[in-house]
Image (cartoon, rainbow, N blue to C red):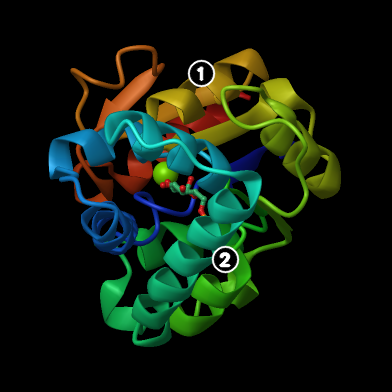
């Protein structure tokens, strides 16, 4: 078959949003303001740089370029301390089942993430070997909702964009997949991911039969 699957990382394969949140919250508190879990929603799928810009807006903090870079670095150091402790137990339910199914059927699998920490995370949780291509924050110049990361992933697995299926948990990510003319599947709250072609709360709600049907349609 001529079909490929592209996975977002944070919130689709692993629940790292909680670690991003803790690291941003620590920085906010050090700068003297609060940062809530609700506000953290806006950070999903958004680049580190853009997240800091939003955070500083929330706290009404102005920064010199040097401070900005320092804070971005500090946040990542804190985040990496959480990542360091990750293992396979943090893989979201039934993700390995889906990856295994695709592998068995020789369907190419790619990662399309905004994170610059994607490879170390996949390695930590033991999923690196499943991916035929990894495109992440180190490869792109334009952030989601721009389709760049997904288009690069499609190119690398040699599948036409319209034959790619994307799993995403972020509004910006669904938009990026749609902008790439790919089939978007929202993983998470359907009332938030309204632009997705299909929606599932998580992979436990999505059967392998659904994937078989998708493959059959292409
Ligand atoms: C993902 C997460 C975002 C995060 C971004 C960059 O898209 O959902 O919350 O800001 O990656 O991650 P990084 O690991 O490079 O800071
Ligand atoms: Mg995500």
Quarter of the image for the C terminus: give it: top right
Tag 1 secondary structure: helix
Tag 2 secondary structure: loop
Left or right, 215 with reference to 86? right
- Image location (x, y in percent) of residue 28: 27, 51
Left or right, 150 with reference to 145? right
Q: Is residue 188 visible?
A: no
Vertically, is 40 above or below 177?
A: below
Which is more foreground, mark 2 or mark 1?
Answer: 2
Residue occupying image coordinates x 37% and y 37%: 61
- Image location (x, y in percent) of residue 179: 63, 14
- Image location (x, y in percent) of residue 108: 69, 52
Residue occupying image coordinates x 68% and y 27%: 163
Vertically, is 169 above or below 208?
A: above
- Mark 2 crowdedness (10 Å alpha carbons): few <14, some 14-19, many ≥20: some
- Image location (x, y in percent) of residue 63: 50, 42
Query: Which of 171 and 132 lies nearest the eye of the viewer?
Result: 171
Disc sitting over residue 183 in the figure: none
Residue occupying image coordinates x 36% and y 47%: 208
Vertically, is 217 above or below 104?
A: above
In the rendered picture of this protein, how many numbered marks are placed on residues? Answer: 2
Which residue is the site of mark 2? Answer: 117
Which residue is the site of mark 1? Answer: 175
Mark 2 within 8 Å of ligand 1, using the beta carbon: yes
Q: Quadrant of residue 176?
A: top right
What is the C-alpha distance between the residues marked 2 and 1?
Answer: 22 Å
Residue occupying image coordinates x 76% and y 38%: 154
């Amino acid at each position: 078959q001529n079909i490929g699957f592209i996975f977002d990382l944070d919130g689709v394969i692993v629940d790292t949003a909680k670690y991003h949140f803790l690291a941003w919250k620590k920085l906010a508190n050090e700068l003297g303001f609060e940062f809530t879990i609700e506000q953290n929603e806006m950070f999903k799928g958004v680049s580190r740089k853009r997240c800091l810009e939003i955070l500083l807006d929330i706290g009404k903090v102005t920064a010199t370029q040097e401070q900005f870079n320092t804070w971005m670095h500090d946040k990542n150091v804190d985040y990496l301390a959480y990542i360091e402790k990750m293992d396979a137990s943090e893989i979201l339910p039934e993700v390995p089942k889906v990856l295994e199914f695709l592998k068995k059927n020789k369907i190419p699998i790619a990662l399309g993430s905004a994170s610059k920490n994607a490879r170390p995370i996949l390695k930590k949780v033991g999923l690196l070997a499943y991916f035929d291509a990894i495109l992440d924050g180190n490869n792109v110049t334009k952030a989601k909702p721009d389709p760049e990361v997904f288009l690069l992933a499609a190119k690398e697995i040699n599948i036409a964009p319209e034959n790619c299926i994307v799993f995403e948990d972020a509004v910006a990510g669904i938009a990026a997949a749609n902008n790439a003319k790919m089939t978007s599947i929202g993983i998470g709250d359907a009332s938030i991911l309204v632009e997705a072609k299909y929606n599932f709360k998580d992979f436990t709600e999505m059967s392998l039969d659904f994937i078989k049907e998708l493959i059959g349609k292409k």
